[in-house]
Image (cartoon, rainbow, N blue to C red):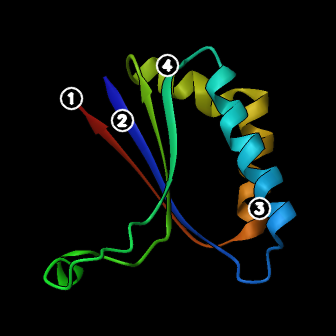
């Protein structure tokens, strides 16, 4: 299994409606055949003071996905819907980091 993570920050000038539209497009990636699981989450703002120093705050959002294998990951990467959504994401973020893990 491959776990694919996309960490990112939205540009501060992004309006709520634009963010909601973008997140709808991102959730649509779950319909790409190669995707087994998709989740989009916002960085936790810890309530416990002792936990705050343990949290890296470089990125405020994370898209995580699961794929059966590396071939499925590459099929996803070249899927036309993914290519379109990735372009829209890049227009609206100020920082992005992509990582893939094998388990």
Which badge, 1 or 2, comes first in the chain's sequence? 2
Quadrant hosting residue 16: bottom right
User: In the image, which is nearer the foreground, mark 1 or mark 3?
Assistant: 3
Mark 3, secondary structure of its residue: helix
Q: In the picture provided, is 93 more to the left or to the right than 70?
A: right
- Crowding around mark 4 (Cα neighbors within 10 Å: few <14, some 14 to 19, many 20+) is some
User: In the image, which is nearer the foreground, mark 3 or mark 4?
Assistant: 3
Q: Which mark is residue 72?
A: 4
Residue 90 pos. (x, y %):
71, 62
Which badge, 4 or 2, comes first in the chain's sequence? 2
Which badge, 2 or 3, comes first in the chain's sequence? 2
Please report contact status of discs 1 and 3: CB closer than 8 Å, yes or no: no
Q: Residue at x 51, y 33 (%)?
A: 38
Identify the residue under disc 1: 103
Q: CA distance from mark 4 to mark 2?
A: 11 Å
Q: Nearer the viewer, residue 98 or 51?
A: 51
Q: In the picture provided, is 38 more to the left or to the right than 81?
A: left
Identify the residue under disc 2: 3
Mark 2, secondary structure of its residue: strand
Q: Nearer the viewer, residue 64 or 81?
A: 64
Q: Nearer the viewer, residue 72 or 63?
A: 63
Q: CA distance from mark 1 to mark 2?
A: 8 Å
Residue 81 pos. (x, y %):
78, 31
Residue 53 pos. (x, y %):
19, 84
Q: CA distance from mark 1 to mark 3?
A: 32 Å
Mark 4, secondary structure of its residue: helix
Identify the residue under disc 3: 19
Please report contact status of discs 4 and 1: CB closer than 8 Å, yes or no: no
User: In the image, which is nearer the foreground, mark 2 or mark 3?
Assistant: 3
The quarter of the rendered structure image containing the N terminus is top left
Q: Nearer the viewer, residue 11 or 41?
A: 41
Residue 82 in the image: above or below residue 45: above
């Amino acid at each position: 299994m491959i776990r694919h993570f996309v960490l990112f920050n939205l540009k501060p000038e992004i309006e709520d409606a634009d963010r909601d539209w973008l997140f709808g497009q991102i959730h649509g990636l779950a319909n790409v055949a190669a995707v087994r699981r998709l989740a989009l989450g916002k960085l936790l703002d810890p309530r416990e003071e002792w936990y705050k120093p343990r949290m890296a705050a470089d990125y405020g959002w994370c898209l995580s996905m699961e794929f059966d294998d590396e071939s499925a990951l590459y099929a996803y990467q070249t899927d036309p819907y993914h290519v379109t959504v990735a372009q829209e994401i890049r227009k609206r973020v100020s920082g992005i980091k992509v990582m893939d893990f094998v388990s």
